[in-house]
Amino acid sequence: MPEQITLSVIKADVGGHVGHTVVHPDLLECAYEELADSDLLEDFYVTYVGDDLELIMTHRRGTDDEAIHQLAWNAFAAATEVAKELKLYGAGQDLLTDAFSGNIKGLGPGVAEMQIVERPSEPVIVLMADKTEPGAWNLPLYKIFADPFNTAGLVVDPSMHDGFIFEVYDLIEGKKIDFSMPEDLYDMLVFIGAPARFVINSICRKGPDGGKGDIAVAASTQRLSLAAGRYVGKDDPVCIVRCQSGFPAVGEVLEGFAHPHLVGGWMRGSHNGPLMPVSNEDSRPTRFDGPPRVIALGFQLAHGQLVGPQDMFDDIAFDEARREANQVANYLRTMGPFEPHRLPLDEMEYTPLPQVVEKLSDRFVPIDEDA
Ligand code: 13P
Ligand code: 13P
Ligand code: MG
Ligand code: MG
């Protein structure tokens, strides 16, 4: 029986310092101590992107394991207490209930997990973003796993040439569908081009029978607003990507972020903005609470140990992407409260906007077609 290892990335915003900017070091330390005290884990790394506290963990217990989810919950709950003590902003923001019950999914935190057999060399990249939503991964994952202009391996590497299978969730209807690349490419784009509703949950290598083979990607798909039934912030997402030897090369994965695309979730979770690739240290969204940030931490897995991280966007090669993001941000800001800088109304249904509509309902009268 080959040795299985599970990689679990679980995140929550349990308080920002200052406002929605970054995670306070005391919260990182608190979460670190909670995980260090546990004997469930093979290894772990605690970090942040903007105001989101990120737990990267390896263990032998499989995905959706109650004890691992409980451990993450306990770390977030303990960090929330520290956040309350420091009166940080939005202490406990993403914890929708007071008590843990079985599985952390649906309780507020974002979760990406995969169980794998470690290859002779197992490079993985953990992508983490702030001021955006799970659909933010759609465009780069499409490029990385289905666009030969991004990923040379789709053309020149025989082990990737057959393509990948994307599992896509419809978050409104609660349904999922598999798309096989490249055959279903045009069909898939109909859906994933609408990332507020359709999000990529996982990607697998195509097996010899054309079915799902080894898992390549696991992403978080939780949407807090749908879970809570009211607006409670965007769901700053995470994503695990395996690289090399039949998967995209590390550089092909990072290339997916070379041109900042527009994502929802900037300022009050109600604006579109460019997703700026930055170093861990630069994931400090200050301008109009943004622009949205993405970091990429690289690890080599070795017998369950997380060898790393390498801070992958901490590279001058991404300076131009950052400059482009700043230019796009400048341009979009000139539009202020107008779409498409502001999100469309149906994406803002949990904001005070319906209250304004309600207040003015009497003043809205039928248009007199004869006048
Ligand atoms: P692998 O086929 O081992 O993934 O190597 C490809 C590569 O790294 C080219 O950049
Ligand atoms: P977060 O979702 O990162 O907490 O940001 C909320 C917000 O409203 C920022 O303007
Ligand atoms: Mg916040
Ligand atoms: Mg956040």
Image (spheres, grey):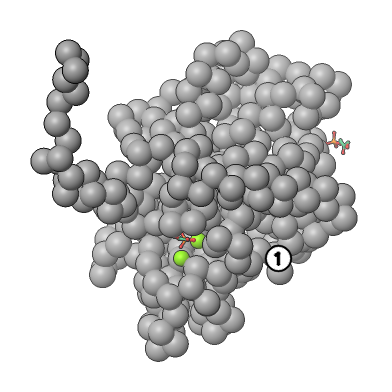
SS at mark 1 in the image: loop
The residue lying furthest to the left in this view is 362
Q: Is residue 313 left or right of residue 28?
A: right
Q: How many labels sit on residues?
A: 1
Q: Residue at x 64, y 29 (%)?
A: 142
Q: Amino acid type of disc 1? A: Asp
Q: Residues within 10 Å of mark 1 (few under 14, many from 20)?
A: some
Residue 209 seen:
no
Q: Residue at x 78, y 51 (%)?
A: 323
The residue lying furthest to the top in this view is 183
In the image, 284 versus 363, the foreground residue is 363
In the image, 202 versus 44, the foreground residue is 202
User: Measured from the top left, where is residue 86 in percent x and y?
Assistant: 44, 87
Above or below, comparing residue 218 to residue 34 in the picture: above
Q: Residue at x 84, y 56 (%)?
A: 315
Ligand 4 neighbours mark 1 (CB distance < 8 Å): no
Q: Image quadrant for the C terminus? A: top left
Q: Image quadrant for the N terminus? A: top right
User: Measured from the top left, where is residue 262 in percent x and y?
Assistant: 60, 40
User: Measured from the top left, where is residue 254 in percent x and y?
Assistant: 76, 44
> Which quadrant of the figure has residue 56?
bottom right
User: Measured from the top left, where is residue 316 in percent x and y?
Assistant: 87, 55
Q: Residue at x 52, y 14 (%)?
A: 187
In the image, 104 versus 140, the foreground residue is 140
Above or below, comparing residue 150 to residue 156 in the picture: below
Residue at which label 1 appears: 282
Above or below, comparing residue 360 to residue 31 in the picture: above
